Amino acid sequence: MLVYAFDAWLGTCGFDGCPSAAEIRAFHADEGGRVLDRNGHFIGRLAIVRRINVPLSDVPVPVRNAFIATEDRRFYEHAGIDWRGLVRATLRNVRAMGVREGFSTITMQVVRNTFAVRRYQGRSLRQKMLELRLSRLLERHLTKDQILELYLNVLYMGNGVYGVEAASRDLFGKSVRDLTVPEGAMLAALPKGPSAYTPRRNHRKALTRRNLVLGLMAEQGYLTRGAADSLKKVPLRIATEEWRPDQSFDSYAIDAVRQVVDSVLKSGSLDVNDLTVYTTLDARAQVAADQAVRRRAAAIQNETGGTGRIEGAMVALDPATGDVRALVGGRTYERGNFNRALLAHRQPGSTFKPFVYATALAAGYTPASEVDDEPVTVRIGKTVWTPQNDGGEYNGHITYRRALMRSLNAATVRVSQLVGIPAIIATAHRLGVASDIPNVPAAALGAASVTPIEMVSAYAAFGNGGWRVSPRLVRRIQSGDGEVLWANDGTRTRVMDARDAYQLTSMLRGVVDYGTGYPVRQAGVRGPVAGKTGTTNGGTDVWFIGYTPTLVAGFWFGYDDPKPIGYGASGGLLAAPAWADFYQQGWKEPPPPANAPNTPAGWQPPAGMTTVTIDARTGYKANEYCPITQVEYFKPGTEPTHLCPLHAEPPVDSAASDTTQNLLEKGVHGIGHFFQRLFKGGDKPQEAPRDSATR
């Protein structure tokens, strides 16, 4: 009965199940796992493993012979277990009354370093018995050359290095295919004691061991005795620099991928080094994003001359799916560093204002609705809050579109008072801002702490027609044999009327084309772009979040310990150029679909909206005398019906009516605007041309 039980135990590899023939054939020594971008391009590893797998054909025959002569002289003769070697080792150990010789074959060493180490921990009789069973399985399903190839790639060679290729680069500074016979013998000397015989620590001991290997090669006919004696005299020269895997691809984005893998697979439950992770990242976009943050942070440092280190962060994702295309958590990457894109809570400044206007649109207001842009006072208990416009200028009656385009604080606060701060907070949370937002009047101007990824994902709803998307960095994770271990298909939820989203996007296009986001155009970006700048009090944080039909990306810059960046700091001047740099270097809008080549670029209005040509200044229905008009889209029943009262008659010929006083006033006004543009950075036209809503 016990015999049958033992046979069952051994036949099932300890009742844990033996690896299948397919698993054995598919196995390869890990190199740290693979991380692939959305197009299947290799972009990084889950773990840094000092190993490079090579085919047996890359290993010179003398190097192979050195290992066989040293580790398993009858490798090509036995079936995984060398019974003659077992008897010889047993007799010698008995005579010595201790362990003087082992009997592990190359096949058994492969098992120990692959399947056995993953299933059975510790050295025991149980493990040894299972190694024998697994060795027979390997011999049954693999050729001798395949086993030898595995062996040469899985061996630990000391100094944190695995496999002969990595060891060759580490010790000799070259590939294993270029090794000489004495150098190959040095590698074959290491498995017996990788730490004891490494030439970096004990050159004399390593040389003695190498020469012993050369002698064994001569004994077994791989070298003549004379050749072996001659080769023993060759000096042992070691490379001065240790070899390290290329880590240039490592980034904050790859760190974030590692965190996802750890969280969904529960660290320790699987060997992550065997995994392939399919991400949503775009390799080209990621490189451009890293460069844009690094270059712009350095430029801000130089331009402002501040003390300390300016930091930056960015997130870019597909607004339709939430797929993250690029992610940068800081100016310079170091593994394990604080990832500002995901974790840094900073005030968003005016990038929060779109939530105010989104709430107003949902409440029935329109881009053409008017609001007073005059000094405003808000009472909070016994205190009084008096927010001011940047520069202290006010515009009187102004449309919602122009108030957002010029990022006017007073007008925005008045809109927020109309719709209520709680409703605005609810809008921001519904769109994807997870951080707490205080229920105070200043919240309308961004008095909250949020992360870049929250803001960017929330903006996605503006550009995708009103859908909330969850940022998705990893699409699926596969094991070494192709089994899908985890997958994320992405989710999205309707959170905004598609018509409101279209109107807000139209308003934010005005910000880029004619408002505070105009530096994006100055940098040469063409095509449909919407976005918003943000600057906190004292210029402590600067933001720009911009989007196109296929990409939404946000940049933040500031000091880790919040303090003013410098005089005149603004999101338009300092952050928007980084967005333009990234977009031009790292992204390309896809062409129209083949079945609809004439599809117009940009966002298309949802069905059921009506169009009215309005006066761009007043928001009223335009008449023949309105000098600046534009086509505006409205939800049915909200469009203006009254003609513009400001331009009810033909304008007076200004050339005939100018007096000396008028000319002087115009001159002073022009000089004022010149200096305003000079110190705010960038020429920002104040008038929107005709048809601006559709440009």
Image (cartoon, rainbow, N blue to C red):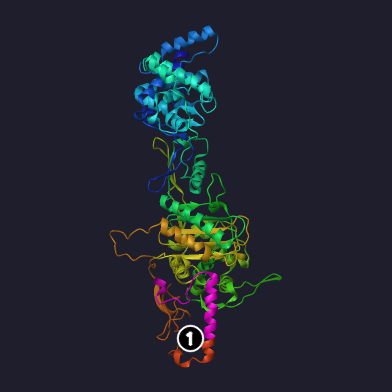
Outermost residue, right direction? 382
Q: Locate residue 484, reporting x and y percent.
A: 41, 40
- The residue lying at 37 percent from left, 30 percent from top is 177
- The residue lying at 47 percent from left, 54 percent from top is 291
Crowd band around label 1 with a 10 angstrom C-alpha radius: few (<14), some (14–19), many (20+) = some
The span picked out in magenta is: 665-694
| Residue at the spot of label 1 | 646
Q: Locate residue 420, reporting x and y percent.
A: 58, 69
Figure check: 175 above or below 353: above
Q: Locate residue 76, reporting x and y percent.
A: 35, 18
Query: Which residue occupies the foreground of this view, 338 or 259?
Result: 338
Query: Which residue occupies the foreground of this view, 456 or 113?
Result: 113
Query: Which residue occupies the foreground of this view, 611 or 574?
Result: 574
Q: Locate residue 104, reporting x and y percent.
A: 45, 18
* Residue 494 inside the magenta-drawn segment: no
Q: Evaluate whether residue 38 shows in this view.
A: yes
The image quarter in which residue 3 lies: top left
Task: Give the side of residue 359 with respect to residue 562, left or right.
Answer: left
Figure check: 560 above or below 669: above
- The residue lying at 38 percent from left, 65 percent from top is 602
The image quarter in which residue 178 lies: top left
Placement of the C terminus among the 4 image quadrants: bottom left
The main secondary structure of the magenta stretch is helix
> Looking at the picture, which amino acid does disc 1 mark?
Leu
